[in-house]
Image (cartoon, rainbow, N blue to C red):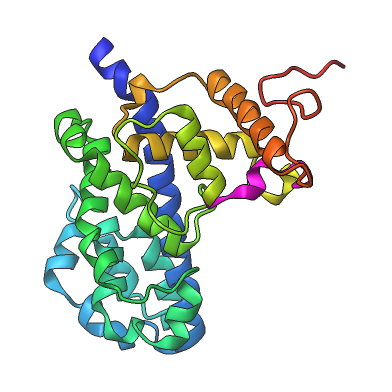
């Protein structure tokens, strides 16, 4: 049991991010396609929706095919059928749709779909397999393959989050350029390089999906794992946030005109507020 427990925290965090990314991909596909193609949303992609290899994957144990039942429901207009079918697609097929369908690769869609439009799409395409394998390894508790490919998996996940617009990290590039197993301060320096506002006193927590310190913790874990650390080896959240204030103290000494977070003023995520 302890072997399973070792991965529970790590898998739960990564799976939550994967699920969020998958839902965002589907939502953006639905929004962009129906906006551009409207009542031709199915017919424009007829090759995809009539692919027998894809159709075969959606039969259930009773021989009912949910994919076909939606596609053939002529009581609904095409836009409605498209809206109904995208949420049921497997991650593999939604990625196939995004990168293989020419009608999807038009500026009117690409400029809306991507938060950061890639200069080339080859890097995203070649990381599709890593993303699919990551999802399968977590779903089936395949610890062995996950450990062997963890860095590649994390790089693929961050790459997609960065371009699709997930708010779980503030990355402009994949931060895998630190020395092997960098120190706490080296990682804080990298986070500051990527997102200095997370260390500024005048930046409110409300600017983010959640508390700034929690953003720092998530980025800290990402960067540590990308550069050689295992989740089981990481310092406690308390140690990481304490080190943050040591780091900002040094920043204030070098840049006295800047207003960085101070330990004795900002309430940390670990403090309990009195009633």
Left or right of 258? Residue 54 is left
Question: Residue 118 placed where, x, y %?
Answer: 38, 73
Question: Residue 177 placed where, x, y %?
Answer: 34, 47
Task: Please say if 49 is above or below 184.
Answer: below
Along the line of sight, the residue nearer the viewer: 204 or 87: 204
Q: Residue furthest top?
A: 2
Q: Residue at x 42, y 71 (%)?
A: 29
Task: Please say if 269 is above or below 44.
Answer: above
Q: Is residue 93 in view from this perspective?
A: yes
Along the line of sight, the residue nearer the viewer: 38 or 241: 241
Taking the magenta stretch, the answer to whether it contains residue 195 is yes
Left or right of 232? Residue 63 is left
Q: Residue at x 29, y 61 (%)?
A: 66
Question: Residue 74 placed where, x, y %?
Answer: 37, 81
Left or right of 73? Residue 197 is right
Q: Residue at x 39, y 32 (%)?
A: 12
Image quarter where the N terminus lies is top left
Q: Is residue 64 in view from this perspective?
A: no
Q: Residue furthest front?
A: 254
Along the line of sight, the residue nearer the viewer: 266 or 90: 266
Along the line of sight, the residue nearer the viewer: 157 or 241: 241
Q: Residues in magenta? A: 194-203
Taking the magenta stretch, the answer to whether it contains residue 113 is no
Question: Residue 199 placed where, x, y %?
Answer: 66, 41
Figure label count? 0
Image quarter where the C terminus lies is top right
Task: Please say if 215 is above or below 26.
Answer: above
Q: Residue at x 31, y 72 (%)?
A: 98
Q: Residue furthest right?
A: 275
Task: Please say if 28 is above or below 224.
Answer: below
Left or right of 228? Residue 195 is right
């Amino acid at each position: 049991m302890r072997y399973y427990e070792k991965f529970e925290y790590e898998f739960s965090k990564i799976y939550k991010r994967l699920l969020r990314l998958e839902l965002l991909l589907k939502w953006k596909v639905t929004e962009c396609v129906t906006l551009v193609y409207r009542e031709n949303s199915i017919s424009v992609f007829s090759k995809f929706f009539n692919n027998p290899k894809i159709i075969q994957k959606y039969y259930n144990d009773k021989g009912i095919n949910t994919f076909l039942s939606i596609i053939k429901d002529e009581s609904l207009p095409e836009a409605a059928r498209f809206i109904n079918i995208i949420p049921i697609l497997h991650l593999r097929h939604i990625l196939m749709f995004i990168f293989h369908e020419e009608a999807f690769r038009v500026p009117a869609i690409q400029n809306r779909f991507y938060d950061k439009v890639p200069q080339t799409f080859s890097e995203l395409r070649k990381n599709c397999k890593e993303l699919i394998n990551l999802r399968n390894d977590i779903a089936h508790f395949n610890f062995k393959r996950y450990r062997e490919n963890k860095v590649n998996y994390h790089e693929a996940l961050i790459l997609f989050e960065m371009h699709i617009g997930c708010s779980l990290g503030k990355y402009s590039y994949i931060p895998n350029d630190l020395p092997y197993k960098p120190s706490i301060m080296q990682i804080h320096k990298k986070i500051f390089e990527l997102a200095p506002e997370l260390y500024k006193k005048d930046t409110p927590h409300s600017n983010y999906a959640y508390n700034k310190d929690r953003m720092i913790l998530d980025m800290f874990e990402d960067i540590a794992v990308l550069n050689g650390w295992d989740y089981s080896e990481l310092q406690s959240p308390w140690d990481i946030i304490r080190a943050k204030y040591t780091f900002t103290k040094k920043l204030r000494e070098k840049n006295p005109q800047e207003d960085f977070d101070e330990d004795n003023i900002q309430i940390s995520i670990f403090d309990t507020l009195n009633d």
